[in-house]
Image: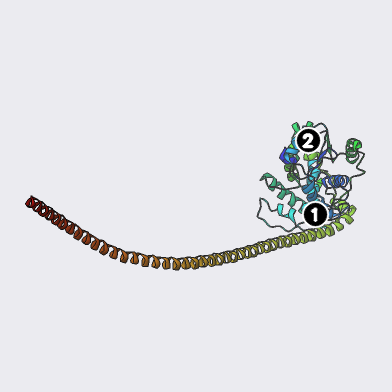
Amino acid sequence: MLTALSGPGSFISHKYKLFVHAPPKCASTSILTALVRLGNPNAEITNDASSENLSSLDIHPYVRDHCRPTEQCLRDIFASSDFCKILVLRDPLSRFLSAIASKYLIGSGPYAQELTLGSTIKYELKKNYSDIQNLKDDVNFVSKRLLTALSLGKGVTHVRPLSGFVSNKDLPLFDNVFNVSDSGFSEAFLTAINLHLHQFGVAVDRLPRFNESPLDIPVDFLESSFLDSILEFYHNDYILLGKDLPKSSDILSSDFDFKKFAQKNSDKLSSSVLFYDVSSKFFQKDLIAKELGTKNRRLERENNEFRDKINISTLEKEKALAQVNNLKTEKEKALASAQKLQEKSLDQNKEIKQLKLAVDELRENDKYRILHIAQLQEDLNRLKSFKDILKKQQLQISNLVDMLLHASL
């Protein structure tokens, strides 16, 4: 339930402690427009949402972007007694026919695409409703296509069963549950919501009326077989509304006169042609605008990517230049260091040469010292020999003296 209630038709105001869920084709455009103007009179909406015309549909993307609750937010809301919680429902058959009249008979745009779901058969809507049979044929064709899409579980936006949003067991979670199809709905809705808003000093004066199509399609336009299928498909919606499933025999008029209907509603039938033509052109223009917007966003994205690439290239170029400059600086430093090393090497070579000369000089001096020592050794040896000779001569003299003394005695 929380996932469905956070989708289209949901509105939350934390300022006014208010949560409203009005699914598509349950007066959602009127209700959301009134609530947005209440909470933010100066809200910037693409077109004038206060005008009662087709441009009011721009209220839905605004609510989606600014006033739609998250699932966690919904958990907090349903757990709080301060919030007023309102659910809006509608008779399924009335809702189904209203969706056909205001959305699916346009024949182009996002809703027309839903008619192709589950079928590959192409069909051009007749649209010339001055012939009432054309309107009947188109209504039954669209009904058949929608039933096919619904039975396949496809995502048709405006005729999805309300029981897919909430169930009977969820109804007690809401303070008020309204049925758009009930007479006096607007008065009852305004009374309930203003009773809550009174504490904040504000009020919703009215619900703007948005007649998106001039046609109100009677149920008698539906073939009985289609009507039975529609009623059966929305069986749970009738249970949700607390009503018994009606029978087609009780709904269809046995004496419905299509010619009288055409005569009575000739102005509406004529203006419906203009409405569907204008709406079709509106959606075609909107589609072209969206395609152009998509192209512009793609081009802008590509331009930004190209700019980013240029910026990246510029940065890479600047980095490369910085690296080149750094390498140049390092090279200059390396050359300067090499120059210093070379100079130092030359100085060292000079010192080496000087040391070599000093060594050679020492070696030469050593040679002279060795020769001098050898000469001194030789002289010493000679002195020793001379000393021995002197000792011998002294001994001989001493012996001679002794002999002379002995002789004299």
Left or right: where does residue 12 sit relative to residue 164?
Answer: right
Residue 116 or residue 261, whichever sits in front: 116
Q: How many labels does the image show?
A: 2
User: Disc 1 residue type?
Assistant: Leu
User: Disc 2 residue type?
Assistant: Ile
**For the point 77% across and 52% down, which residue is it?**
104
Left or right: where does residue 334 sit relative to residue 305?
Answer: left
Separation (CA) of disc 1 from disc 2: 45 Å
Q: Are there few (<14), some (14-19), or many (20+) residues within 10 Å of tag 1?
A: many
Marker disc for residue 145: none
Question: Which comes before the other along the chain, label 1 or label 2?
Answer: 2
Residue 236 or residue 17, whichever sits in front: 17
Marker disc for residue 77: 2
Tell us which disc is closer to us: 1 or 2: 2
Residue pushed farthest left? 407
Q: Where is residue 2 in the image (x, y as percent from the top left)?
A: 73, 38
Q: Where is residue 87 in the image (x, y as percent from the top left)?
A: 81, 38
Residue that badge 1 annotates? 135
Residue 24 or residue 230, whichever sits in front: 24
Residue 258 or residue 201, whichever sits in front: 201
Which picture quadrant has residue 18?
Answer: top right
